[in-house]
Image (tube, rainbow, N blue to C red):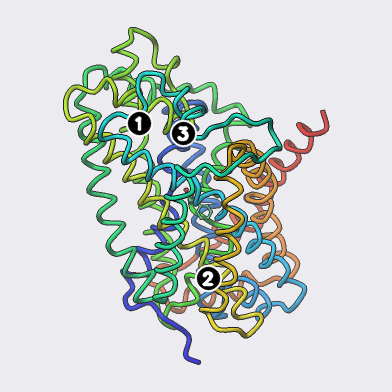
Amino acid sequence: MERSQWGTRAGFVMAAIGSAVGLGNIWRFPYVAYENGGGAFFIPYLFALLTAGIPILIMEFTIGQKFRGSAPLSFFRMSGKKLEWLGWWAVFVSFIISCYYAVIIAWAIRYTIFSFNLAWGSDTEGFLFNEFLHLTVQPGQTGGIVWGVFIPLAFVWIITLGILFAGVKKGIELANRIFIPTLVVIFLIVVLRAVTLDGALMGLDAFFKPNIEELMNPAVWVAAYGHIFFSLSVAFAIMITYASYLPKKSDLTNNAFITGFANSAFELLAGIGIFAALGFMANQQGVAVADVAAAGVGLAFVVFPQIINEFPGFNGLFGALFFLSLTLAGLTSLISITETYVAGVSEKFGISRNKSLAFGGGLAALISILFATQGGLYFLDVVDYFINQFGVAFIGLVEVILVVWVFRKADMLKGHADAISDIRLGGWWKICLGIVTPIVLGYMMFGLFKVNLL
Ligand code: PHE
């Protein structure tokens, strides 16, 4: 059967950006930057982007486009069974991520609706844990299903699997062409409103104030690399899969730069918007920005509702737009993660895409119900922790070492990318992939083991 293809180059780039821009950009980046040197963080961040993020993205685009398969098949075609397993590992990690990523999107959908009448009241933390999540059981127990999460979760899976069912061009590409521009417009409105609030400058000051001595702290560099991996969705098998639907002659290097910079631009925008809003709240409550700054679930579902409560006029609308941004950013990433294993399984076992979709997607949807139970948040925390610690950067490290050093494919990939690009990959590409990235990632791993042994 003919391999599916993207309709246009812009469609592919939009889908790659859709995968990269996700919850991580909105709720993770601002706080990581703030915690790790503020304005000074941009130095390790840019370094990580240029030495690891974009070089690996170019590598994955090239592997996918040249070998025309999802990660396991592409790796198999490149170096046989000895590399195929790495693809399956990445596919497995993606599968697990999709199970809980979907749940967070379900929360965001629910909170979009809550925004209109500020249903969370003044105790936003109590509301989240007690009234919304019904977190009343002990860690490790499931308790009953929480319908307020289950229903939007079902909706998330219906949309995601429905889009994948429609195919690469009519489904994934079309959805991204609609969702991504909409997301950018909505998010710009949120950010513009946030920066014009009283106290916004105080927040921006806290965000951008450079803490130069932090540059000497290795943990800050590790944070920058870790964030870039998650944020750009590299080492998850995703970008290989997406690139496998490209026509034979598309400029991969250029596309990788566009994707990388667009993702960072979005993150920067998020940092500005989030910290402006935090500055507003700190000002309102007469406390320091440090007292209200947070990340992840705490930022989006506890602090943000408080900000929305104190908002001067149109707060329901502001809240709804914020949570809608989170929803759209999350959905386009979830689509990409799910496509990874749907394509992987279908190619390996020679079953149709739709069967694989029903089986793989259905299984992920079933497992995700675990996170929509009363003890769901505990499970989510544990799984998220392990995936982030042992999944993300670890696969990246093994990937570069195997591709560059063990199977020695860097020159061949470079030749392929250069032949179809306006941009030549100089020696920097191989040095970044083969030397700089393994050293930094190796250090990260070593640091993690140390932490865990203590
Ligand atoms: N890059 C996405 C984000 O920033 C997350 C993601 C991770 C998406 C892994 C796909 C795969 O949120």
- Give the Cα distance between marks 1 and 3: 23 Å
Kindly tell me whether mark 2's CB lies below 8 Å from ligand 1: no
Location of residue 140 by image quarter: top right
Kindly tell me whether mark 1's CB lies below 8 Å from ligand 1: no
Foreground label between 2 and 3: 3
How packed mark 1 is, by other alpha carbons closer than 10 Å (few <14, some 14-19, many 20 or more), is many
How packed mark 3 is, by other alpha carbons closer than 10 Å (few <14, some 14-19, many 20 or more), is some
Q: Is residue 435 left or right of residue 1?
A: right
Q: Which residue is mark 2?
A: 241
- The kind of residue on which mark 1 rests is Ile
Q: Extreme bottom residue here? A: 1
Q: Which residue is mark 3?
A: 132
Name which residue lies at 68% across and 44% down.
Answer: 386
**Residue 390 image offset from top left, x and y in percent:** 70, 47
Q: Which mark is residue 274?
A: 1
**Which of pointers 1 and 2 lies earlier in the amino acid sequence?**
2
**Which of pointers 1 and 3 lies earlier in the amino acid sequence?**
3
430 to 128, vertically: above or below: below
Kindly tell me whether mark 3's CB lies below 8 Å from ligand 1: no
Question: Which is nearer the eye, 277 or 212?
Answer: 277
Q: Secondary structure at mark 3?
A: helix
Do residues under tags 1 and 3 come within 8 Å of each other at their CB atoms? no
**Which of pointers 2 and 3 lies earlier in the amino acid sequence?**
3
Name which residue lies at 46% across and 27% down.
Answer: 34
Q: Is residue 242 left or right of residue 327?
A: right
Q: Extreme left residue here? A: 313
Name which residue lies at 59% across and 26% down.
Answer: 216
- Give the Cα distance between marks 1 and 2: 32 Å
Q: Is residue 167 left or right of residue 177?
A: right
**Residue 203 image offset from top left, x and y in percent:** 33, 21
Q: Secondary structure at mark 2?
A: helix
**Residue 175 image offset from top left, x and y in percent:** 33, 65
